[in-house]
């Protein structure tokens, strides 16, 4: 069965994805390239993009990615309506309304204030934070506070960590939580568009199998921890996320105690390995000593080998 057959059929709920990111390109070409791919993935999944109505920088790349890819799935998902809603204020609308690309957007919502713009965007089912500047940080902080204080319906937050862009921000948020100044936020962290598609597929399955948004959010919290396991198991395009999910659910529902413990150990191992790999990559890019991280990776691999050897002896 193909990916299209398994994961891209029209769901009972075409999820809305809000993307927050920069209106500049940034110095690394990967920011724009990966965000264009994000837009393509949103179209591929049959989702709708809710964003801040721009054709420049990272945000423009996401919109162009959707617009360039939605037509090949037009009959299945969208009809004649482009799957993009631009949400902006009067000042920004007048600045961009004659843009050739933005004129292709079927729906534009014009709010009175930036505050109302943020609130409208947060009606989406999933929020993705892409590389950006102070405005992106403002929206990230606003969304976290709104959700933790109960002003926002619980929903998944995805960090699109292109080339480690959000590494220091994520570390800072961990410090805030550890210091008692904030509650931990279960960000689903992905490093590229392929990992993002895996997260999208899993979120869609979890949304469609949940009674309400609160249950979907609880599942999303779990996915923040489990995603590296799925990424590790999906070794190539012939391995389907849906099959990994079904196998995992079968073990959780009717597997023996040893099977459940082995699954929990694999999930934990994959999570730790992914965290350490991100740390290692970040240190390598800054030219700092990676010996400590290399030692941790070596010990993790030794632990994994020991676990596998023990399994073979049973």
Image (cartoon, helix red, strand yellow):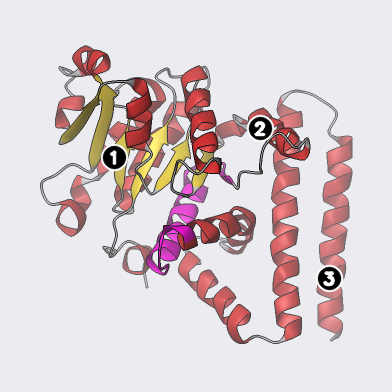
Q: Earlier in the sequence, mark 1 or mark 3?
A: 1
Q: Which mark is residue 162?
A: none
Q: Please state the extent of the stretch shown in magenta in the rendering.
A: 187-214
Asked if residue 14 lies left or right of residue 225, the reply is: left
- The quarter of the picture where the N terminus appears is bottom left
User: In front here: 209 or 8?
Assistant: 209
Asked if residue 180 lies left or right of residue 141, the reply is: right
Q: Is residue 20 magenta?
A: no
Q: Earlier in the sequence, mark 3 or mark 2?
A: 2
Task: Check disc 3 and report its element: helix, strand or loop.
Answer: helix
Residue shown at the point (32%, 68%) measured from the top left: 5
Q: Which mark is residue 307?
A: 3
**Where does residue 179 sit, x and y in percent of width and height?**
78, 35
**Where does residue 247 sit, x and y in percent of width and height?**
56, 77
Q: Is residue 195 magenta?
A: yes
Residue shown at the point (75%, 60%) measured from the top left: 269
- The rendered magenta stretch, by its main secondary structure, is classed as helix
Q: Which mark is residue 167?
A: 2
Asked if residue 125 lies left or right of residue 108, the reply is: right
Examine the rendering and report whether any part of residue 243 can be seen: yes
Q: Mark 1 = which residue?
A: 66
Examine the rendering and report whether any part of residue 240 can be seen: no
Residues at badges 1 and 2 in contact (C-beta under 8 Å)? no
């Amino acid at each position: 069965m193909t990916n299209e057959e398994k994961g891209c059929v029209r769901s009972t709920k075409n999820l809305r994805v809000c993307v927050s990111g920069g209106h500049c390109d940034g110095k690394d070409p990967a920011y724009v390239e990966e965000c264009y791919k994000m837009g393509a993935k949103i179209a591929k999944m049959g989702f709708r993009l809710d964003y801040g109505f721009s054709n420049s920088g990272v945000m423009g790349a996401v919109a162009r990615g959707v617009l360039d890819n939605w037509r090949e799935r037009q009959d299945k998902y969208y009809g004649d309506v482009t799957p993009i809603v631009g949400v902006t204020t009067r000042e920004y609308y007048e600045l961009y309304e004659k843009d050739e690309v933005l004129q292709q957007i079927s729906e534009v919502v014009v709010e009175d204030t930036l505050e109302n713009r943020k609130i409208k965007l947060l009606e989406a089912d999933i929020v993705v934070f892409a590389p950006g500047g102070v405005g992106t940080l403002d929206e990230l902080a606003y969304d976290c506070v709104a959700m933790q204080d109960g002003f926002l319906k619980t929903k998944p937050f995805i960090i699109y960590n292109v080339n480690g862009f959000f590494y220091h921000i994520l570390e800072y948020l961990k410090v805030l939580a550890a210091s008692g100044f904030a509650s931990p936020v279960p960000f689903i962290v992905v490093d590229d568009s392929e990992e993002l598609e895996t997260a999208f597929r899993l979120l869609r399955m979890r949304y469609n199998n949940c009674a309400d948004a609160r249950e979907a959010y609880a599942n999303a919290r779990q996915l923040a921890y489990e995603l590296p396991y799925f990424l590790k198991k999906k070794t190539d395009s012939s391995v389907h996320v849906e099959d990994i999910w079904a196998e995992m659910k079968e073990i959780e529902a009717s597997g023996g105690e040893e099977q459940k413990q082995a699954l929990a150990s694999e999930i934990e191992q994959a999570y730790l390995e992914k965290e350490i790999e991100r740390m290692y990559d970040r240190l390598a890019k800054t030219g700092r000593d990676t010996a400590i991280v290399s030692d941790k990776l070596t010990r993790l691999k030794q632990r994994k080998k020991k676990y596998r050897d023990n399994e073979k002896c049973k």
